[in-house]
Image: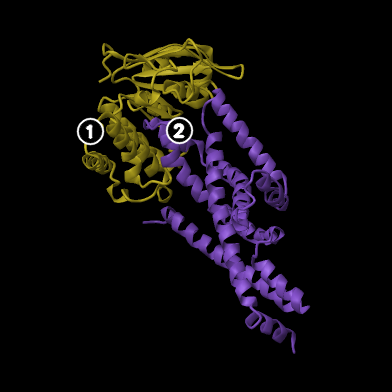
Amino acid sequence: MNDTNNEVILSVQHLKKTFNKLEVLKDVSIDISKGDVVAVIGPSGCGKSTFLRCLNCLEDPDDGSVIIFDNVNIADVRIDINEHRRNMGMVFQHFNLFENKTVLENITLGPINAALKKNKKASKKAIVEEAKTKAMTLLERIGLVDKANAYPSTLSGGQKQRIAIVRALAMDPKVILFDEPTSALDPEMVGEVLQLIKELAQSGMTMVIVTHEMGFAKEVANKVVFFNEGIIEEEGNPKEVFANPQSVRLKDFLSKVL
Amino acid sequence: MSNFEIFWSKFSQGGGYVDYLIGLQNTAIIAVLGLVIGFIIGSLVALVKFIPSNKWPVKILKGIGDVYVTVLRGTPMIVQLLLVHFALFPMMGLGWVNSVAQAVIVFGLNSGAYMAEIIRSGVNAVDPGQMEAGRCVGLSYSESMIKIVLPQAFKNIVPTIGNEFITLLKETSVVSFIAVIDLTKSMDSIANSTYEYFVPYIFLAITYLILVLGISYGIKLLERRLKKNERHQ
């Protein structure tokens, strides 16, 4: 893992995003390779979350932006974004588990839908069974098999977030995006979620993580990106970035959060 | 004869109960069909509003929906009823249509305007994160809407739809203006022919109250069923 010579899987070029004349992202370019774990840090309102949401077009990037994912420019409005989102998982700050579905249904909804679309002739029953088996394996991995038929409102925050991660994993994504995955959790539940993300990193999953957990970023990421006022102000190896920050703004930021 | 005896002789021997049963039937038909038609129209109007497109056919549909809701909510039901029964239908050569059917159409159209707003606000009340999560597992906008957002919205609006049903039921009392025998009309007839007002109107009030309590109970049961996913397993 973390081999810098790996192929680039996600290439962002001149990404811009404006909300009603407010320039949130000014000109962001970054290459993310297979197996990379990129930690995105920065002060509030610097565009971190918007950057992440642009990566899977939850926010439409401005014209001229280029996001090459799987050899397709997904910033182009003419492509079928649903197809590409299936290869890009997303984990939200507030979990966003489907409230009207059981844990098992939460995990299998996306994969079943994707498989049915890809293979119109396959028997639905076989697809459903396969998705269920896979979901149960994943639940076993996080020790929540007994919650398969529970509804999200009965779970703790930590359980919800681990299930949200598993829901993303069940799609077999090429990249998983995390939008402050531990910010809405009670302190005692942060550990279990970070542990799961760490295991994913060790298994070679490519991930982009917006986070305020600096210790975690230092330990797990192989690349740290510091956002400030809509641009990437500094990026590099976590050891260098944290030990030897170059820009004044990053020094100031780190002095406040570390 | 006591007040009650006067009422009772008219009700039982004078054929009052026949009118009462016809009235009960008409009231129920108008309220229930009005609600069903209203729900269908309201769903269509609300869903058109949520089409994420600004192409002109969609814009025109959205505009029609807006005008419909504004006009139907902005005028009294009784005026709509009179207009349809005495002016619009005869002008279109439809004067022969059964008065109960006409009332059902007016109630459905009127209720549809309120339902559109109820459904729209129900959808808006669902956390936008639910739609985003649906999109992020590769579902399209409409798939996310159908599988995730609408079921949650429906659960939110069941109590409000119950209120709408109760309002509709009570409002059926205006159909006597177009010569439909409803509950109110049936008791009105007894009161006017016996000059004994107290008992028939109290009897009428109790009938409405029992119907409303029945609806409230049904709604509560439905709510409880829909809330099953908030219970621990």
Colour for chain A in the figure: yellow
Dot 2 amino acid type: Glu
Q: CA distance from mark 2 to mark 1?
A: 29 Å
The local secondary structure at tag 1 comes to loop
Does residue A220 appear to the left or right of A230 in the view shown?
A: left
- Where on the picture, by quarter, is residue B187? bottom right
The residue indicated by pointer 2 is: B132
Relative side of B219 to A125, left or right? right
The local secondary structure at tag 2 comes to helix
What numbered label is drawn on residue A162?
none
Are dots 2 and 1 on a single chain?
A: no
Between A212 and A6, the one lying in front of the other is A6
Frontmost residue, B22 versus A85: B22
Work out whether residue B91 can be spotted: yes
Q: Is residue A19 above or below residue A179?
A: above
Q: Position of residue A102 (x, y in %)?
A: 36, 47
Q: Indicate left or right for B178 with A99 as reference.
A: right
Image quarter where the C terminus of chain B lies is: bottom left
Q: Position of residue A92 (x, y in %)?
A: 43, 33
Q: Where residue A95 sits: x, y (%)?
A: 43, 38
- Residue occupying image coordinates x 40% and y 47%: A152
Q: Residue at x 41, y 53 (%)?
A: B229
Q: Which residue is mark 1?
A: A121
- Decide: is B141 above or below A59: below
Q: Residue at x 55, y 44 (%)?
A: B41
Q: Is residue A92 visible?
A: no
User: Which lettered chain is shown in purple?
Assistant: B
Give me the chain letter of mark 1.
A
What amino acid does circle 1 point to?
Lys
Residue at horizontal 24 percent and vertical 30 percent from the top: A119
- Residue B70 or A36: which is nearer the viewer? B70
